[in-house]
Image (cartoon, rainbow, N blue to C red):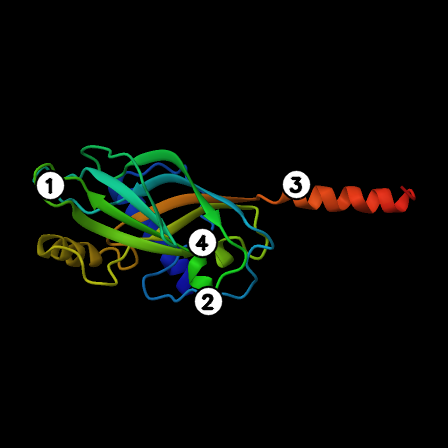
Amino acid sequence: NERAEMQKELEALRNVAGFAQEVVTKQVKAPAEVIKSSAAGPSADGTLTVELEQCLGLLPADKNGKSDPYVKLFLGDEMRSSKTISKTLDPVFKESFKFEIKSQVLSSDAWILRLEVYDKDKGSKDEFLGEATIHLIDAFTGEWAHSGPIETVLQDPNKRLPPKLIKAVEQRSTRNKRAPQGLATVVLSFKPTNTSVRESRHLEQRKGGFGL
């Protein structure tokens, strides 16, 4: 089926690039897939922690056949940026980033995490390598706690790749149609910040029960 074919092609991508089998895949979103929200958002305001694990099979932006990749993470109006790792297509970041999450929002778009991968260039504009979006509602599958590893496909929905990298994508697509721009892996966790409010209510209930 389509899911099995997707996993087979991603496995082929890892084998071609010599990837280590360290990442446990929870979900893979193909470029053409639309994420549909089916569950509720968080029941309280809190802090989202994004653990940026690694990227695999990135596009080579430099003449040496490598890139100097870093990742920008966007959630609502907030942005975080990772460190730059030099001369690699398979950077391992192992970095954590925190975002404040509101439980009451006008649109569930406020719960969409966007990753943008760039090649760092000295003296010139950094080159775009790909992006991925993760809807937190789907990542947490209804329970806002811990997502487990999420491996997502990088893509170019707004046609931002430079011409030389578009050609590289076309060449890669002949052997890997699902992830020619590579993959990114993150782990998400959420912690409510209003625990003190709940605790105070619980204390009031206990006092009421003992007649205090």
Foreground disc of the pair 3, 4: 3
Total residue callouts: 4
Tags 3 and 4 touching, CB below 8 Å: no
Q: Nearer the viewer, mark 2 or mark 4?
A: 2
Q: Vertical placement of 195 versus 3: above or below?
A: above
Q: Mark 3: which amino acid?
A: Ser
Q: For the residue labelled by badge 1, is the local secondary structure a helix, a strand or a loop? A: loop
Q: Quadrant of residue 90?
A: top left
SS under mark 4 = loop
37, above or below 154, in the image: below
If you read the primary sequence from the N terminus, does the residue marked by circle 3 or circle 1 appear first?
1
Question: The N terminus appears in which quarter of the rendering?
Answer: bottom left
Above or below residue 89? Residue 107 is below
Q: Determine which residue is flagged by label 2.
A: 36
Residue at image location 82% in from the left, 47% down from the top:
205
Q: Position of residue 5 (x, y in %)?
A: 37, 60
**Mark positioned earlier in the residue sequence (3 or 4):** 4
- Between discs 2 and 3, the one toward the N terminus: 2
Q: Measure how far apart labels 3 and 1 are at the Cα level.
A: 51 Å
**Are there few (<14), some (14-19), or many (20+) residues within 10 Å of tag 2?**
few
- Judging by the rendered image, the residue that carries numbered circle 3 is 196
Considering the numbered disc 3 on the image, is that residue within a helix, a strand or a loop? Answer: helix
Residues packed near mark 4 inside 10 Å, few (<14), some (14 to 19) or many (20 plus): some
Proximity of marks 2 and 4: CB atoms separated by less than 8 Å: no
Q: Are marks 3 and 1 in contact (CB under 8 Å)?
A: no
In this rendering, the answer to whether 175 lies above or below 107 is above
Image disc number at residue 62: 1
Q: Residue furthest front?
A: 212
The CA distance from mark 2 to mark 4 is 14 Å
Q: Position of residue 158 (x, y in %)?
A: 23, 63
